[in-house]
Image (cartoon, helix red, strand yellow):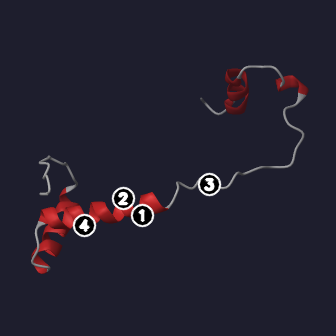
Amino acid sequence: MGRHIMKTTIEIADDLFERAQRVARREKTTFRSLTEQGLRLVLRGRQNKPAKLPPLVTVRGRGLTDEFKNVSWDKIRDELYRGRGA
């Protein structure tokens, strides 16, 4: 059973492309091969590790003051930025 090859076009930063080309020449391989190796490494790493969420940041307090209970987030935001030119 043969391997199907998909042709595609990708856009990458010039400096990244140039670095990859230099590595490919030095290792006597192709840009395509180097790109496939890189994709395999990234995909393997993501497959083995579930996405991690940053730790939850909490502070001690009693929640919203009576003034801000049952008001819209727009009002809370406006109060936070009052006097700051926003």
- Mark 4 vs 3, N-terminal side: 4
Q: Earlier in the sequence, mark 4 or mark 2?
A: 4
At label 3, the amino acid type is Pro
Q: Quadrant of the C terminus?
A: top right
**Of 29 and 57, the residue lying toward us:** 29
| Residue under numbered circle 1 | 45
Q: Residue at x 78, y 19 (%)?
A: 71
Q: Do the numbered discs 3 and 2 sit on residues whose CB atoms are within 8 Å?
A: no
- Residue 18 at least partly seen: no
* Label 1 secondary element: helix
Q: Earlier in the sequence, mark 1 or mark 3?
A: 1
Taking 24 as reference, is 86 above or below it? above
Q: In the image, which disc is placed on residue 37?
A: 4
Of pointers 3 and 2, the one earlier in the residue sequence: 2
Question: Could you say which quadrant of the image residue 82 lies in?
Answer: top right
CA–CA distance between discs 1 and 4? 12 Å
CA distance for labels 4 and 3: 29 Å
Q: Within 10 Å of the Cα at label 2, are there few (<14), some (14-19), or many (20+) other Cα atoms?
A: few
Q: Any mark on residue 54, and which?
A: 3
Q: Amino acid at mark 2?
A: Leu
Task: Check if mark 1's residue and mark 3's residue have beta carbons within 8 Å.
Answer: no
Residue closest to the far front = 1
Choose mark 1 or mark 3, whichever is in front. 1
Image x and y of residue 69, in percent: 84, 24
The answer to whether the residue labelled 2 contacts the one labelled 1, judged by CB atoms less than 8 Å apart, is: yes
